[in-house]
Image (cartoon, rainbow, N blue to C red):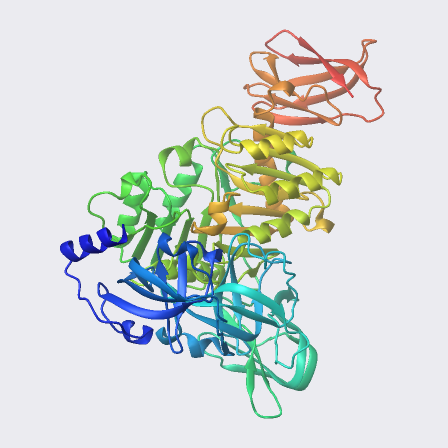
Amino acid sequence: MTGVLAAFLLLCTPLVVFSQQTIGQIRTLPVGSVVTTTGMISCGNEFGVVRYLQDENAGISAYSTDLSLTQAGDSVIITGVLSRYRGELQLSPVLSYEVVAEVDEVKSLSIENLDDISIPGFESRKVNIACAGIKSCESELSAGWYEVFDQWGNIARLWIAENHPAQGFPLFNRPLVVEGIWTKFEDQYQLMCQQITDASEGSCHYIPPPSLSFENNLPVLSWSNVPEATTDVWIGEESYDFDISFGQWSGSAVAKPDFLEPGILYQARLTQQDSSGMLFHSVPVYFSTPALTAPPIEILFNRSINATYSDGSTALAVGSSAIENDLIERIDNVTHTLEVAMYNTGRASIVQALTRAVQRGVLVRYIADDETSNTALQGQLTFPLLLRSGDGIMHNKFVIADAHEPEGAWLWTGSTNLSTNQLSTDPNHAYVIHDQALALNYLREFNEMWGQNARYGDFKTNNTSHLFQVGDALIESYFSPSDETNCHLIEAIQSADHQILIGLLLLTRNDLVDEIIQLHQEGIDVRVILEDEESSLSALAQLRQAGVRVVTHDPSPIFHHKYAIIDEGYPESDPLVITGSHNWTWSADNINDENTLIIHDQRVTNIFRQEFEARWGELNPTSIHTDLINGMKVYPNPASSFLHIENPFSESCGVELINVDGQIVMHKDIEADQTSVLTIDQSLPAGLYMVRIVSASQPARLLTIVIQ
């Protein structure tokens, strides 16, 4: 078979055939060359079909199922065609190979500085990185991508393969020795991990990653377990312009810069100089200083909400045209720049607004996904459009306006695509945040996906800030897949002390399901809305078996939200909302372009709860009665602490709760076209009661309910 393939290639392709050369020599030849070389296999099946081989001075990958019987330590003579896959030079197809020696020790190149080996000469070689660290939200390693860093703050990608023995390795702030194959992935270098060991007992100069918080409207940069040495914290925008000197220092280093301007994205790193004069750096942290004043976050829903749960907080607008009309009005007032990253666009009205902006002199750029319907973006456009392709999808939904204008910058995001159904009928939300630093943070993500050298999906970098203070709200910002979003979702879920209300299109990650069930078992009030039975089948089965209250939104339209509301109404428990484009799935966290915000603010959580309770009431058919006065609803039944009464008509009515003796024990008046809550007196005995609805134009109607 190998011979047939070789003959076919030689007949059909204008290949140049070379005599046997070293790996270093064949790496200089053009793609398409047929080459023969000798090298030692440096991996087994841990990375799948691919094999890496090296000699004393260079390495290369080879992709062929024919090599599946080879193992690390085999010396081979191999003939193949030079090709590239996602930036990596490889032999594929492999035309022939012969094992000439078996199972020898594979030599590893010991290195310290990741920058020193980020050149083609080190590609595909086995390397040993001394004094490395792994920057992660997780407590232990699992399969997937991580960030590995060296003593000088240089960062590379680290890949942990499925079923690798390193899975479960505990991650603490400690130095490590990481060994693996140094490879090329698009325009980045990465390490395919083969072994990790603890280096805490060694003498390397390890500076752990920093943490970021805010205190008294100032950013707080912290480094713990810092070695003893001369220490400085350097801060700047593109370069490090400002210096905070600590002198000779060890332990925890905390910097609170009070000289920075709001609305600017800064970066900071800790630098130390040892007694020999050697400089060491931490990985950078990106941050901004809060603006002293900020308008409130403006929230919009395209479906009705249940305002009886309001603590005085209100949505900006509600209704089938609210989101679309608001966005068009905002676009019509932009003066300088607009960036749009939108999975799906079908509304010509939005594109027409963007066209008007271009005609006013606004610079407009647009990124969409190439695998979905974008009917409004077809034909000739007045602005540049990038259609993202490749693995995964560009699933973002955000608009950035006038990011470089301190007073005019705003960010629009949420769950809503710009299609007719998404804007008008599919339950969705959007919100606008007026904060220049956050807008610039999203602009940095947009620019990474833009242009000829665009990065998207699983080869983007973690290069944005993850914490902002906007007025009284603390906001976490994460982009997928680079920022370990799922890990931060778990952190947020685990923070629940009293209640979590979840509304999702999709839930397929078992780790998130496990966390939800754990909260339920701890006595936390948990309620979940999922779009349908089929898409989240396994999650639904597990949640129901555990006794979690969950309903599905099987009828049309599509329940498209992606939110979780945690501890609304409990200010001491840090109420927060998880929101954005990120479905709770493997693809969202690993290959899609997604954006997520975690907003710590009681007002925002209260507004989102009003939306959740409206949908929960609609979707609980066992507790909603629609036979009262032509569609008036009273629920739940049985009831324990409250009754919802929805009055959709143009006149007010009275609601009476009557016990079995005929006594009116509670009464409430409800205005026209309103939903209200009758809080049940907890001193009332459990049993059967009657609800009587009284209005001016219709006869009284009675309903039997059970109070538990």
Residue 89 rendering spot, x and y as whole percentages: 32, 65
Residue displayed at 22% across by 65% down: 33
Residues 26 and 375: in front is 26
Question: Eyeballing the image, is 473 above or below 18?
Answer: above
Judged from this view, the residue extending furthest toward the top is 699
Q: How many marks?
A: 0
Instruction: Describe residue 320's horizontal placement relative to residue 278 as left or right.
Output: left
- The one nearer the camera, 230 or 307, is 230
Name the one closer to the observer, 85 or 302: 85
| Residue placed furthest toward the bottom | 276
Write the residue at 83% across / 9% down: 661
**Which residue does the image show at 64% across and 63% down from the upper left?**
171
Q: Position of residue 66 (x, y in %)?
A: 36, 54
Identify the image quadrant of residue 537: top right
Can residue 404 be seen here? The reply is: no
Can the viewer see residue 573? yes
Picture coordinates of residue 128 (x, y %)? 52, 73
**Residue 21 horizontal side relative to residue 298, left or right:** left
* Residue 340 locus on image (x, y percent): 36, 51
Which residue is at 64% across, 34% downward? 527
Is 564 placed above or below 384 here? above
**Quarter occupied by residue 322:** top left
The quadrant in which the C terminus is found is: top right
Say whether residue 671 is left or right of residue 110: right
Residue 311 placement: quadrant = top right
